[in-house]
Amino acid sequence: MTSLKRSFWLVVGLLCVALGLIGAVLPILPTTPFLLLAAFCFARSSDRLHGWLINHKLFGPPIRDWQERGAISKPAKRLAIISMIVVFSISVFLQIPLYALGLQALALFGAATFILTRPSN
């Protein structure tokens, strides 16, 4: 792989880690998808950062579960579904236009279906 490609994957991976860390604090921004993407990017750019991420005490287990079995833990599933319900409820409370609620409901239903059909550990 060329140096330019490695640099690209490294920058994208670092950006994903930053977004994942922000998502750990902000309830509306997800953490795990960004960290999964960071692991993917680091696997193509930095063995050291890839190893750090997948062996991290907090972030490593969900990444390894996903890489090995495509699994999402039951607590993570529960948190994701509750977050979706809260976000949709806020949209209803704010009287978002009906077409937007419909699109949001469709997207959230698709995401919930995907999450709930993944194996649990």
Image: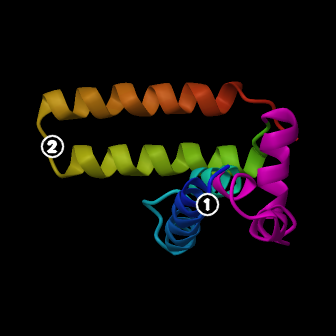
Residues 15 and 46: in front is 46
Residues 14 and 26: in front is 14
Residue 3: x and y, percent? 61, 60
Amino acid type shown at disc 2: Ile
Give me the residue at 25% from left, 26% from top.
102
- The answer to whether 57 is drawn above or below residue 61 in the figure is below
Q: Residue furthest front?
A: 2
Mark 2, residue position? 96
Q: Quadrant of the C terminus?
A: top right
Residue 4: x and y, percent? 54, 58
- Total numbered circles: 2
Q: Quadrant of residue 6?
A: bottom right
Amino acid type shown at disc 1: Ser
Q: Is residue 44 magenta?
A: yes
Q: Quadrant of residue 29?
A: bottom left
The dot on residue 39 is none
Q: Main secondary structure of the magenta part?
A: helix
Q: Residues within 10 Å of mark 1 (few under 14, many from 20)?
A: few
In magenta, the rendered stretch is 41-70
Residue 2: x and y, percent? 62, 53
- The answer to whether 63 is drawn above or below residue 49 in the figure is above
Q: Is residue 96 left or right of residue 6?
A: left
Of badges 1 and 2, the one in the foreground is: 1
Give me the residue at 60% from left, 64% from top.
10
Q: Is residue 5 magenta?
A: no
Mark 1, residue position? 3
Residue 53: x and y, percent? 77, 66
> Is disc 1 placed on a helix, strand or loop?
helix
The earlier-in-sequence mark between 1 and 2 is 1
Q: Is residue 47 left or right of residue 27?
A: right
